[in-house]
Image (tube, rainbow, N blue to C red):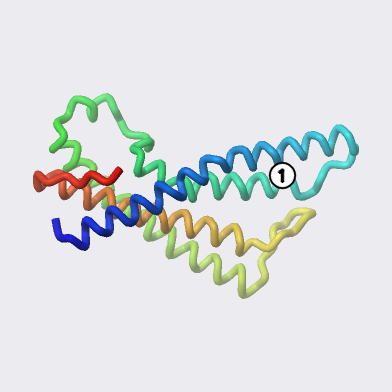
Amino acid sequence: MPKFAIAYVRIVDRINYFIGRIMMYGIFVLMAILMWSTISKAAFVVPSSWTLEVAQYVLVAYYLVGGAYSIQMGANVRMDLFYSRWSDRKKAWVDSFTILLLIFYLGVLIYGGIDSISYAIEYQERSPTLWRPLMWPVKSVMVFGIFLMLLQAISELIKDIAKLRGAPINVL
């Protein structure tokens, strides 16, 4: 494999590994927000108007920004009924094909996401709830997470091609 491809894989894998390990702790942030929501309803009788929406935004960040780490660790869902019986070479062929579909899908999502962010900024789009936060910050986090997944998908494609060529790239 060319040196730039190996460097790309190493850099992207390290970045996504680091970000993914940090995002793993996002569940505790989500738990704290939901705990505050519960306490405020019980103790103060008046529920906080922001807790449910902030919890949803944290969940979006947890899910999408951590998605690249999930791809990297092979935690994505696949039909293991057949896949587990295939040789490493056949797995690499199938993964190469399916990852191309994923790259296309993520590219479409980024295109739409950037358009949605520009709309949200231009028109100062707000959530239609009582709290009414601006929408562009959460949309930006979503596009960032999708972008990280796209980078990781390209990294996985390069690793599959290297496997098919008989020179696998080991990063972690």
Label count reads 1
Residue count near mark 1 (Cα–Cα under 10 Å), binned few <14, some 14–19, many ≥20:
some
Q: Give the side of residue 105 with respect to residue 156, left or right.
A: right
For this orientation, the residue located farthest to the left is: 166
Residue identifier under label 1 = 52
Which picture quadrant has residue 166? top left
Instruction: Give the residue at x 84% y 36%.
Output: 41
Which of the image's four quarters has the N terminus?
bottom left
Residue 67 place in picture, x, y as percent: 44, 46
Please tell me in which quadrant of the rendered image residue 117 appears: bottom right
Q: Residue at x 37, y 34 (%)?
A: 77
Q: What amino acid is at disc 1?
A: Leu
**Where in the figure is residue 90, as x and y percent of width and height?**
15, 36
Q: Which of 28/43 is in front?
A: 28
Residue sitting at x 37%, y 60%: 107
Image coordinates of residue 140 in percent, x first then y, are 54, 62
Nearest the viewer among 89 and 19 is 19
Element carrying mark 1: helix
Residue displayed at 62% across by 50% down: 57
Compare residues 1 and 45 and report the one nearer the observer.
1
From the viewer's perspective, is 170 left or right of 112?
Answer: left
The percent coordinates of residue 62 (x first, y second) are 54, 45
81 horizontally vs 131: left or right:
left
Give the quarter of the figure containing the C terminus.
top left
